[in-house]
Amino acid sequence: MGFLDMLRGGRGAPAATRQEPILAASGPSSPADAFQTGGVWSTVSMGGPSRSGVVVNERTTLSLPAVMQAVRVLSGVFARVPMHYCRIDAGGSHRLEKDPLYQLMNGRPNEAQSRYLFREILMSDILMAGNFYAYVSRDAFMRPVALTRLCPLSTQPLQSFDRQSGQHMFYDATLPDGTAGRFSSRDIWHVAGMSRNGLQGMNPIAYMREAFGESIATASYVQNYWRNNGQPPVILTSDQNIPPEVKQQIKEDWKARYSGPSNAGEAAVLSHGLKASYMTSSNKDGQLVETRTMQVLDIARAWGVPPHLIFELSKATFGNIEQQSLEFVIYHLGPHFARVADSAAHTFAAEGCTYVHDPSELMKGSFLERAQGVSALRNAGVLTTDEARQNFDLNPVGGPEGQQRWRPANTGIDGQPPEQPQDTVT
């Protein structure tokens, strides 16, 4: 085997390269197996019917407008925020914009997707499936050069434990070209959502199936109601004795002639002494509107989105929306920023380096608030002229003038006598 093959970490490398144990064809059956799946928290079945009788999966869940908006807001805002590759030392944090690892997250992750699209699908997978997986393409020197998203449902994480070296992760995955295999953590970038075992994220749709099922069933009820021309259920009564087969025929004739929007306004002509009466229960009495509002709030809770961002404004005021938007960045997007950045640093970053999200663009506030804040920092000598102009996307002045820092006349340096004003010659 050649030198480059050794750098690639091939299966035929010397003893220094760890071999991947072979999983039995029947799959892991006990904790003593060399490989184990994530445990009971990763075995929740997907796509089955809920207690409300409707199928809950990714497609049916995304058919709810509140879910679509929640996922769109979270993934879209997350994709906007840059993730800088930085070196941390005694002098502070320094962006390594020329480093290939910086471009991997902020440039072109692959030839097919832009940075925004890649990061949007990254967050969407975490929200909808609980996990994001990407195949890491590397060059001859084992440097990552491209990231290719893998389907979360066709990737299975496996763990191997050794008492000397600890825990190791491997993945059974199907690549976009249709080939399947077992890959080490060097080849798969895995970002797990909220987890109960630290190895695999919990699937939100599977664990909140009943809550989503209620919303889907309610939407189905409304659709059926309007499909029936908005008419409540009807009861046909008669004083005559009607045989069962005739009752069935009457029922089918009624549905064919008077049900559905195409039969709206049709006059009913009844025989056999039949009388039609409608059930008195109404959607207002059943609090349909209130039920749908509460279901939107449940969806907001499920995804961690302030209700006003999915257009539930029944309790919103102009005073609390701004505060909720700030909390959205800190408490809802903040954990996602930390989760993705730490996973990227764990997988790719060199020693002494890390990834950091910069959500400053989301927290600038109104123009007047920004102007007052920048003015206060400028007058206190914290910002230079060019740094102050950068906050408003203005071109730098440049030169000594752009690097000037003001110093208030009534301040000084601790331990030094105050500067005396110089006499001017007139």
Image (cartoon, rainbow, N blue to C red):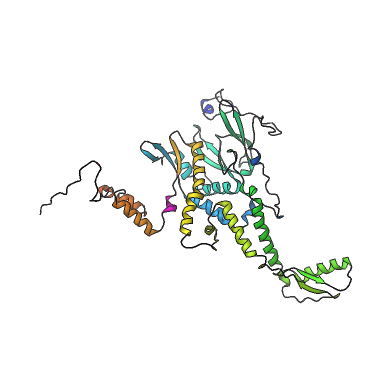
Instruction: Determine the residue located farthest toward the left in the rendered image.
Output: 426
Residue at position x 42%, y 40% in the image? 86
Residue at position x 20%, y 43% in the image? 417
Q: Is residue 362 magenta?
A: yes
What is the x, y in percent for residue 57? 66, 51
Q: Would residue 130 appear left or right of 406 to someone viewing this image?
A: right
Q: Would residue 363 appear left or right of 310 to someone viewing this image?
A: left
What is the x, y in percent for residue 344? 50, 40
The answer to whether residue 88 of the structure is visible from this angle is yes
Tally of marks: 0
Report which quarter residue 307 is drawn in.
Answer: bottom right
Q: Is residue 312 magenta?
A: no
* Looking at the image, residue 15 lies above or below residue 35: above
Look at the image and tell me in which quarter the C terminus lies.
Answer: bottom left
Q: Would residue 317 appear left or right of 42 to someone viewing this image?
A: left
The answer to whether residue 67 of the structure is visible from this angle is no
* Looking at the image, residue 242 lies above or below residue 26: below
Residue at position x 42%, y 50% in the image? 360
The magenta segment is 357-365
Depth order, front residue of 411/337: 411
Look at the image and tell me in which quarter the N terminus lies.
Answer: top right
What is the x, y in percent for residue 169? 58, 34
Report which quarter residue 96 is drawn in.
Answer: top left
Q: Would residue 205 appear left or right of 391 to someone viewing this image?
A: right
What is the x, y in percent for residue 156? 63, 39
